[in-house]
Image: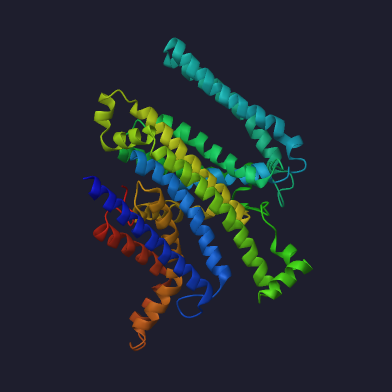
């Protein structure tokens, strides 16, 4: 038995090395070969890789929830949006006039809201009276709206063409990544307290709805992050391309390597981001692997495999589910903050479930749920295919329809070619579920 286990482990390691090597070759081809399949641009290759690394961090958070504990979270997009809010509130400079217009009253409203919830819980604990609890909630809600509505109106009327929001604290942007994780963790605590007692299918419905609610709040509360008017010029932790292009030393350095200043500046910035993302990714993987192989991780997998038996052994299943739900959501929130920092833009309308929930789940399933390295492999691979399918799909359709005479059918196929990425993702998922149902790198 020991010999079989060692052989299986060795086989898994070789499979992982081979798959990651193939993936690396694809990125090298994308950066060096220029033809119908590859762009031949290192800027494009590194841009795909950076978003792949951010998707890998998100997939790690989902893998903690599903792979460790069997929690079916379909509200991934909401936790990403919560994390994305952090760079706006932490790193942007304060908006002139916003705090004097309604900042103090706004903070008072938020404190009243929290106090109302605390008093309502205290009233229920002490009296077990639904009437007393309801009176506290109604009175607190009236006081909250009395403070909140005028404050929001004043803030949104403050230079609405450029701002109309509360602004940030002007703190370092790297700090906002940690705060993004904290925002998502707090949201997960509130959601988990309500939803984790539900059955898995009801939990999925609850998280789906709550995720959409979070995105809807970002779209409609202009005082928070300008709503659908978006936030631009979010500070970044790396040098700006224009600053590099105006630096004579960097221009000379780029010329020695055979690059123009514009191309080299883009590559340098993307390499800088890649280095930061890799550090964060490796730290999260290290902590996740330590947790997974600890007594806590073994307990979580035991709960996942048989909740009834775990409860019979005295384990508090709901509490453990809440723990892993918060941890996974915090990792997703960190990824959300990092995505906004990479783009320099917060656009709430871009948070759609297809990209930020469904695709992340495909990454986890394809890579291998329960295996952290599998989640990383699946995330980077699926993101590469998601981007390249937009190029490869039309090329394939054009090749297949080339011999056909001009007709309505041919025109329809060519017009539908950009949607090939959806067909490609479905096909990849079906093939993996058929031939590798536990993923490319299964859980050991």
- Splitting the image into 4 quarters, where does residue 141 fall? top right
Q: Is residue 38 left or right of residue 163?
A: left
Q: Residue furthest front?
A: 3
| Colour pattern of the rendering | rainbow
| Residue 430 location (% of width, % of height) | 28, 60
The answer to whether 82 is drawn above or below residue 257 in the figure is above
Q: Does residue 277 appear to the left or right of 380 in the view shown?
A: right
Image coords of residue 49 (percent x, y): 51, 62
Q: Quadrant of the N terminus?
A: top left
Front-most of residues 407 and 298:
298
* Residue at the top extreme, as displayed: 127
Residue 138 visible here? no
- The foreground one among 246 and 413 is 246
Q: How many marks?
A: 0
Residue 49 appearing in the image: yes
The percent position of residue 90, horizontal first and vertical second, equals 66, 42
- Quarter of the image for residue 145 reads top right
x, y percent for residue 68: 36, 40
The answer to whether 159 appears left or right of 295 in the picture is right
Q: Residue at x 26, y 55 (%)?
A: 437
Residue farthest left in this picture: 1
Q: Residue at x 39, y 81 (%)?
A: 398
């Amino acid at each position: 038995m020991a010999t079989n286990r060692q052989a299986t482990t060795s086989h898994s390691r070789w499979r992982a090395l081979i798959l990651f090597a193939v993936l690396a070759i694809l990125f090298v081809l994308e950066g060096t070969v220029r033809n119908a399949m590859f762009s031949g641009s290192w800027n494009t290759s590194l841009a795909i890789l950076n978003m792949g690394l951010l998707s890998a961090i998100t997939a790690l958070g989902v893998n903690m929830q599903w792979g460790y504990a069997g929690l079916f979270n379909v509200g991934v997009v909401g936790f990403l949006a919560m994390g994305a809010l952090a760079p706006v509130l932490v790193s942007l400079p304060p908006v002139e006039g916003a705090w004097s217009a309604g900042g103090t009253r706004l903070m008072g409203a938020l404190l009243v809201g929290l106090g109302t919830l605390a008093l309502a819980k205290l009233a229920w604990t002490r009296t077990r009276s639904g009437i007393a609890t309801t009176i506290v909630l109604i009175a607190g809600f009236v006081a909250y709206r009395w403070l909140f509505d005028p404050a929001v109106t004043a803030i949104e009327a403050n230079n609405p063409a450029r701002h109309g929001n509360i602004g940030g604290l002007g703190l370092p942007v790297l700090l906002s990544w940690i705060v993004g994780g904290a925002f998502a963790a707090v949201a997960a605590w509130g959601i988990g307290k309500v939803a984790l007692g539900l059955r898995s299918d009801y939990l999925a419905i609850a998280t789906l709805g709550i995720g959409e609610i979070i995105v809807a709040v970002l779209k409609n509360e202009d005082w928070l992050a300008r709503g659908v008017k978006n936030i631009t010029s979010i500070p970044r932790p790396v040098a700006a391309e224009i600053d590099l292009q105006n630096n004579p030393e960097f221009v000379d350095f780029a010329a020695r390597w055979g690059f123009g200043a514009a191309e080299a500046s883009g590559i340098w910035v993307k390499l800088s981001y890649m280095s930061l993302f890799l550090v964060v990714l490796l730290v999260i993987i290290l902590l996740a692997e330590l947790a997974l192989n600890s007594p806590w991780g073994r307990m979580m997998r035991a709960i996942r495999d048989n909740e009834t038996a775990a409860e019979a052994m005295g384990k508090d299943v709901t509490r453990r589910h809440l723990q892993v739900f918060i941890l996974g959501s915090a990792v997703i929130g960190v990824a959300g903050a990092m995505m906004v920092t990479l783009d320099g833009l917060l656009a709430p309308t871009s948070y759609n479930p297809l990209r930020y929930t469904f695709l992340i789940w495909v990454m986890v399933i394809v890579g291998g749920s329960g295996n952290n390295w599998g989640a990383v492999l699946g995330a980077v691979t699926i993101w590469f295919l998601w981007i390249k399918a937009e190029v490869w799909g039309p090329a394939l359709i054009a090749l297949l329809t080339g011999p056909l005479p001009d007709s309505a059918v041919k025109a329809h196929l060519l017009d539908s070619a950009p949607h090939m990425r959806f067909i490609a993702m479905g096909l990849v998922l079906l093939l993996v579920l058929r031939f590798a149902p536990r993923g490319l790198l299964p859980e050991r």
